[in-house]
Image: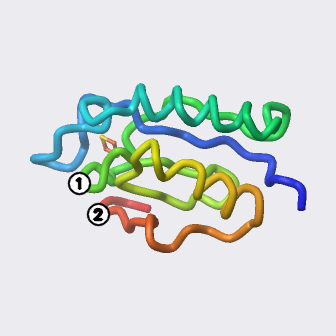
């Protein structure tokens, strides 16, 4: 099965919109982005799948938050060790990873 062509936005905000949350930028967002890019490259998906830093998605209490752009699925909190499952299941096999999905408290 071909991977979904999409972009993963990884929240890098240090100014969370949900009061009392630390902000994903303080919770390892940079490491998560680096790992995500490495995992995409390992699969040879560089032409179809991008990983980019993103702004706050009002899911701050579940950070680090990752949004899959093509269907707006939100994941969080995401650890680097979760990325292979997200990439293989959601992007590779078109099956979102329900155990990692989160519902934001904001406007989505
Ligand atoms: S700071 Fe990451 S979702 Fe708000």
Assign a secondary structure to mark 2: loop
Query: Ligand 1: which quarter?
Result: top left
Q: Earlier in the sequence, mark 1 or mark 2?
A: 1
Are the residues tagged 1 and 2 within 8 Å (C-beta)? yes
Assign a secondary structure to mark 1: helix
Expressed as whole percent of the image width and height from the top left, the position of residue 107 reads: 38, 60
Expressed as whole percent of the image width and height from the top left, the position of residue 28 reads: 33, 33
Quadrant in the picture for residue 26: top left
The residue closer to the viewer here, 69 or 2, is 2
- Indicate which disc residue 105 carries: 2
- Left or right: residue 38 compared with residue 64: right
Quadrant location of the C terminus? bottom left
- Left or right: residue 73 compared with residue 21: right
Question: Within 10 angstroms of label 2, few (less than 14), some, or many (20 or more) residues?
Answer: some
Expressed as whole percent of the image width and height from the top left, the position of residue 10 reads: 48, 38
**C-alpha gap between disc 1 and disc 2:** 8 Å
Expressed as whole percent of the image width and height from the top left, the position of residue 56 reads: 37, 40
Residue reaching furthest to the left = 20
- Left or right: residue 15 compared with residue 54: left
- Indicate which disc residue 61 carries: 1
Quadrant location of the N terminus? bottom right
Residue visible at 45% across and 72% down? 99
Residue visible at 73% across and 46% down? 6
């Amino acid at each position: 099965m071909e991977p979904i062509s999409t972009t993963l936005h990884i929240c890098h905000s240090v100014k969370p919109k949900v009061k009392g949350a630390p902000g994903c930028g303080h919770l390892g967002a940079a490491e998560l982005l680096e790992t995500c890019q490495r995992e995409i490259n390992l699969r040879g998906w560089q032409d179809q799948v991008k990983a980019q830093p993103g702004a706050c998605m009002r899911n701050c209490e579940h950070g680090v938050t990752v949004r899959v752009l093509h269907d707006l699925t939100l994941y969080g909190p995401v650890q680097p060790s979760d990325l292979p499952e997200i990439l293989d299941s959601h992007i590779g096999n078109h099956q979102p990873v329900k155990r990692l999905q989160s519902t934001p408290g904001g406007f989505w």
